[in-house]
Amino acid sequence: MRLDQSLFSKMTAEFIGTFAIVFSGCGAIMVAERFPGSLNAVAIPAIFGLIVTAMIYAVGHISGAHLNPAVTAAFAVARHFPVRQIPAYWLAQILGALAATGMSTLLLPAGAGYGAAIPHVLVMQAFGWEIMMTFFLMFVVSAVATDTRAVGTMAGAAVGASVTVCAYIGGPITGAALNPARALAPALAEGRTDVLWIYLLGPTIGAIIAAKLYEWIRCHAPSEAIKEETKT
């Protein structure tokens, strides 16, 4: 895969967007833990939703604002994203998340937590929750990002609202990661890799199912991006 300027720009956008999500969302969790009373826990889901909304509007026109390895995989499976670009996007997203956790660690006092998603139910229940929540998130993403009949200017608001709702409902149950990159970096920092598979596999399965289901119900042709890929 040749790393041309266009792809490098997209990777940079994905890096920045994912960095912002982890730095703001997981950083808020770290702030709440290190400075008790400074940040109400009920504000954290809103912070995640708002930063996702902001980053979609900031970099969506550059990279598509996947900001999530599960979303990238789902777009590729649904033929809305070139398969050959998956490694580049995943690398940018993971590095962005790792850099954000590292920066939060440098800028905040030492503490026990780094915003890792931890299940508070049985393992398979948590796995199911991550699948279901990411399914609904990706269903909205597929609608607003790939269907020309949707109101494109509302894409960021719709996706951000979905993240917020899922975080409010699923946060107390699984931490509502919905994003393998967001789950990976804090888990590594905390040494909580025992349940990491839930947050890597669950969101990916949920996102792929949602993307495929939306393709089926809308009855449209494959993305032009894939048509272009087949010409090269």
Image (cartoon, rainbow, N blue to C red):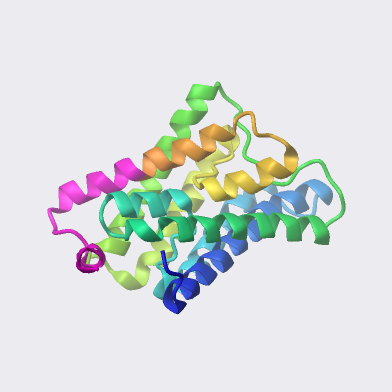
Taking the spot 70% from the left edge, 49% from the top edge, the residue there is 29
Q: Position of residue 181 (x, y in %)?
A: 56, 50
Inspect this view and state whether residue 36 appears. no
* Front-lying residue, 4 or 199: 4
- Residue 221 on the magenta segment: yes
User: Which quarter of the image is occupied by the C terminus?
Assistant: bottom left
Q: Is residue 185 left or right of residue 92?
A: right
| Residue most extreme to the bottom | 5
Look at the picture and state if 205 lies above or below 182: above
- Residue 63 on the magenta segment: no
User: Which quarter of the image is occupied by the N terminus?
Assistant: bottom left
Q: Position of residue 57 (x, y in %)?
A: 46, 72
| Most frequent secondary structure within the magenta stretch | helix
Quarter holding residue 134: top left
Q: Is residue 89 left or right of residue 15?
A: left
Taking the spot 49% from the left edge, 65% from the top edge, the residue there is 53
Taking the spot 37% from the left edge, 45% from the top edge, the residue there is 207
Taking the spot 32% from the left edge, 60% from the top edge, the residue there is 81
Tell me how many marks there are. 0
* Front-lying residue, 11 or 137: 11
Q: Position of residue 66 (x, y in %)?
A: 44, 60
Magenta segment: 208-232
Q: Position of residue 169 (x, y in %)?
A: 51, 40
Look at the picture and state if 71 lies above or below 82: above
